[in-house]
Every structure is written in structure tokens, then in C-alpha cells.
Image: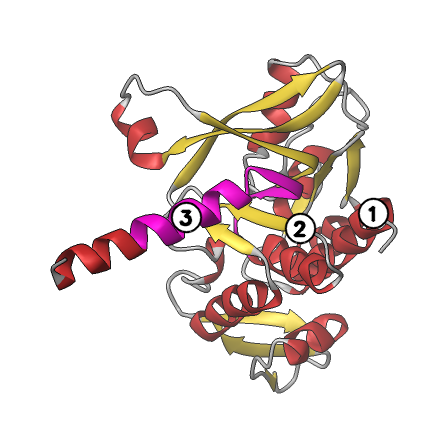
Amino acid sequence: MSIENVISSAIVRSFSAKLEDALNLDVAIVGAGPSALVAARDLALKGVKVAIFERKLAPGGGTWGGGMLFNEVVVQDSAVGILDSFKIHHKPIAGADGYHTLDSVEMASALIYGAVSAGAKIFNSISVEDIVFKNGKVNGLVINWTPVERLGMHVDPLTVISEVLLDGTGHPSEILHLATEKAQIRLDTETGKVLGEKPMWVDSGEESTVENTREYFPGLFACGMSANNTAGGYRMGPIFGGMMLSGEKVAKLIAQRFGK
């Protein structure tokens, strides 16, 4: 066999084995932003079988671009321990006690590496077009390639079965919207629906992102900006402490379900 075919065959076999193994999961996470990556790392370290499905080619969510393409972000003291656990460098902001700046590219790459090295699997360029819902319970995801979705090609999807589903899709709260609109699920919110994000208020947004991280329907959780959007919290801009604390919190909540 030529070296070209050896390489191609190895890629096909390795990816196929990885995807097949991920068709049955303890936890399926949609979206690979900072909160989801922290959650995936923490869950994997506890022995929970977890995989992330990310629509874009590059995982990391809104981290890469920093604030308006200035690739620096801010994290507050309460989340510095998480930065340190991922070995992400940071420095205090002069005149703003309790806040630190860090390189957004280092942060994104470190979170990705941390999640994968802990045992979580990340599948990029995969879109979630529906959920699996049987006997009144959320049972998993319906997935397809992102290019298939964007080109509007008529290609049937595959399914991923999971005990728990975590919406980490950010501002759109895509999975919770699917749950309410297609499965007619009533969420644990004031209206039973996704309430929608309020305008920017940094302090409130940071607090509510963590506070709103929870289970919204049996087996269906939300973290990060998805949780904040679902419960009607305020936006917080290029500050990421609340996002990482949200990932840490949801991992603890989910791990309890598996006795971890």
C-alpha cells in the first residue's frame, strides 16, 4: 500500500473508531466555548464519558477574538484558580483590584488542550439539528456535518445517545430552543421558555451566569451564556470568569448524577 493510502486509511479508521465510541455517552455537550470546555475537562477527570460537538472548525467559542479583536480578555479573582489549573498565564490590572488580563489565544488553546488531555472528545464542524426525545425524556442529539447544514443538502443525520445533554451554545441557547419548540418541553424558567438575554451589565451578568447554570429539564442542563440567555440574565462582554465558574459548577451538578 502506498504511503498516501496508509495515511488516508489511518485517518478514516481512527476517526471512525472515535466517533463510534461517542455514539453512546454519559454527557453530550453542544458548543465548545469556555464554560463547556471547563465542564468537559472536569467531568472527564471524574471518569464521566463526555464529548463536545462544535459547529465551527475551531473550538473555543468567543474566546479567540478577545474584546473587539484585541486578543486579550479579563478574568476576576474568583476564577483565577481555574486559570491556574489549566496553566494559563495572567496578570493583575493596575487600578482594578481583583481583575486580571490574559491572552485570549492562550486561553482558548489551553482550555481545548486541557479538555482533550483529560479524556473528553471534541468533534468540530458538526452541527446539532435536533434532539432525541423519547418517553418524555431528552435522550441525545441529532447531528450532521456543518457544511451539509449550510449548503442545505438533503443528507440524513446520525444520532448520539446520552444520559445528560448540556447546552453550551452561547447566546442563542439553541438546544433549549429546540427542546421547547419541537418537544414542547417546559423549562425551569418563569415562562417555561427561553427568556432571552438583557443588555450589558458586567457585574450582574457575571453573577447571573453562574447562578443561572443549572438543570432546566430532567437531563437537560445549560451553562455559560446559554444559561444566562435562558434565564434572562444580563450580558457581560469580554470578561470570562463567570463563564469558567459556570463550567465548573455544571460539571459538579452533572457529576453528582453519576455518583462522582
Q: Nearer the viewer, mark 3 or mark 2?
A: 2
Q: Earlier in the sequence, mark 1 or mark 2?
A: 2
Contact between marks 1 and 2 (CB within 8 A): the answer is: no
The one nearer the camera, 143 or 19, is 19
Q: Quadrant of the N terminus?
A: bottom left
Q: CA distance from mark 3 to mark 2?
A: 18 Å
Instruction: Depth check: give the residue in front, 146 or 202.
Output: 146
What residue is shown at x 77% (from left), y 18% (from top)? 186
SS class of the residue under badge 1? loop
Q: Which residue is mark 2?
A: 49
How far apart are the alpha carbons under marks 1 and 3?
26 Å
Residue that badge 1 annotates: 258
Query: Where the C terminus falls, by quadrant?
Result: bottom right
* Residue 229 x/y as whole percent: 65, 37
| Crowd band around label 3 with a 10 angstrom C-alpha radius: few (<14), some (14–19), many (20+) | some
- Does residue 35 belong to the magenta stretch? no
Amino acid type indicated by mark 2: Lys
Check residue 18 for magenta coloring: yes
Picture layout, residue 232 above or below residue 184:
below
Instruction: Please tell me the numbered disc located at residue 124.
Output: 3
| Residue 93 horizontal/vertical position (percent) | 61, 83
Point out the tag, 1 or 3, that comes first from the N-terminus: 3
Task: Determine whether label 1 and label 3 are within 8 Å by CB.
Answer: no
Q: Is residue 57 visible?
A: no
Which residue lies at the image location 76% right of the left edge and 61% below the top edge? 46
Q: Considering the numbered disc 2 on the image, is that residue within a helix, a strand or a loop?
A: loop
| Residues shaded magenta | 11-33
Residue 29 placement: quadrant: top right
Q: Label 1 sits on what residue type?
A: Phe
Position of 63 with respect to 241 (left or right) is left
